[in-house]
Amino acid sequence: QLQLQESGPGLVKPSETLSLTCTVSGGSISSGRYYWGWIRQPPGKGLEWIATIHYSGTTYYNPSLKSRVTISVDTSKNQFSLKLSSVTAADTAVYYCASAIDNTPFDPWGQGTLVRVSS
Amino acid sequence: DIVMTQSPDSLAVSLGERATINCKSSQSVLYSSNNKNYLAWYQQTPGQPPKLLIYWASTRESRVPDRFSGSGSGTDFTLTISSLQAEDVAVYYCQQYYSSLTFGGGTKVEIK
C-alpha cells in the first residue's frame, strides 16, 4: 500500500525559498502509471493544487503559482520535491503530497506538514 | 481555470437524515471521447488529509460506505449522504480534474 510522508522546515522567512520533500514507500516512484503532486491548505481555508510530476519529468503547474514553483523527482531516493520561491505570509499553509494513477484524482495523500512564513 | 462553486457553505443535518451538497463547475468537465465526468469528491475531518470518496462523478472508492453517492454531469454535481452518521461530520470538497486541477470551497457538514 502506497504511503507518502512530507518533510521539511516548518518555518521559512519571507522572500526565501520553501523546500519540501515527499518520501514514497510501499511502491516505486518510477511506476509509469503514477503521478506525484503537491497541494496546500492555508489554515482554516480550502485546498489549492500546486504542481504535479511524472517520473519521466513531465510537469504540470498551477498557473497562478507557476512562476515561483519547481517540482522535481529523485528516483534513486524514491522522493519528489517542491520548491516555492519568494514566499510571503500568504504561503503559510499545510502542504500535502499525494499520488494519482493515470487520469484519476489524488489518492492517497500524506499527512501534511505545516509551513509558516514569518520573520 | 475552471472555477468550482459549492453550496451550501455549511449544513446541519439530524442523524439518520439525508445530506445533499452541490457543486457547479464554470465549464463542462464531461470529456466527450470517453463520456466521463472528471469530478471527484473528498472528505476531510479535522487534522486529517482529504480522503477520496468518489471519482468520475459517481464511482465510489472501494472502502467508502454506500450511504455516500455522487451524481450529475456536465457542470452540475451532487454528493448525497443518505443517512448521516456521526463519523460523517467533516468538510467535503469537490474537485475537477478535466483541465488542470481545481477544488470547490468546501461544505461543512454538522449534526443538528
Image: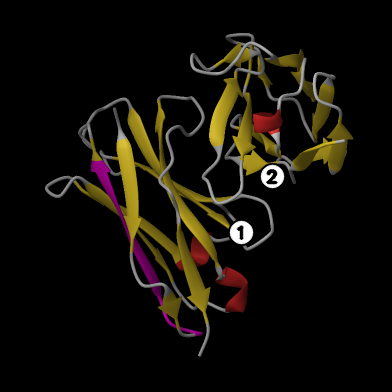
Q: Which residues are magenta?
A: A14-24
Residue A64: image tag: 1
Q: Label 2 near label 1: C-beta < 8 Å?
A: yes
* Type of the residue with mark 2: Asp
In the picture of the structure, the residue carrying the numbered disc 2 is B1
Q: Outermost residue toward the left?
A: A76
Q: Secondary structure at mark 2?
A: loop
Chain that bears disc 1: A
Position of B55 compared to B28: left or right? left
Chain that bears disc 2: B
Q: Is residue A89 visible?
A: yes
Q: Residue at x 77, y 31 (%)?
A: B27
Q: Residue at x 22, y 31 (%)?
A: A27
Q: How is the image coloured?
A: secondary structure
Q: Residue at x 75, y 14 (%)?
A: B71
Q: Position of residue B48 (x, y in %)?
A: 53, 46
Q: Residue at x 19, y 45 (%)?
A: A78
**CA–CA distance in space, label 1 to label 2:** 10 Å
Residue A22 part of the magenta-drawn span:
yes
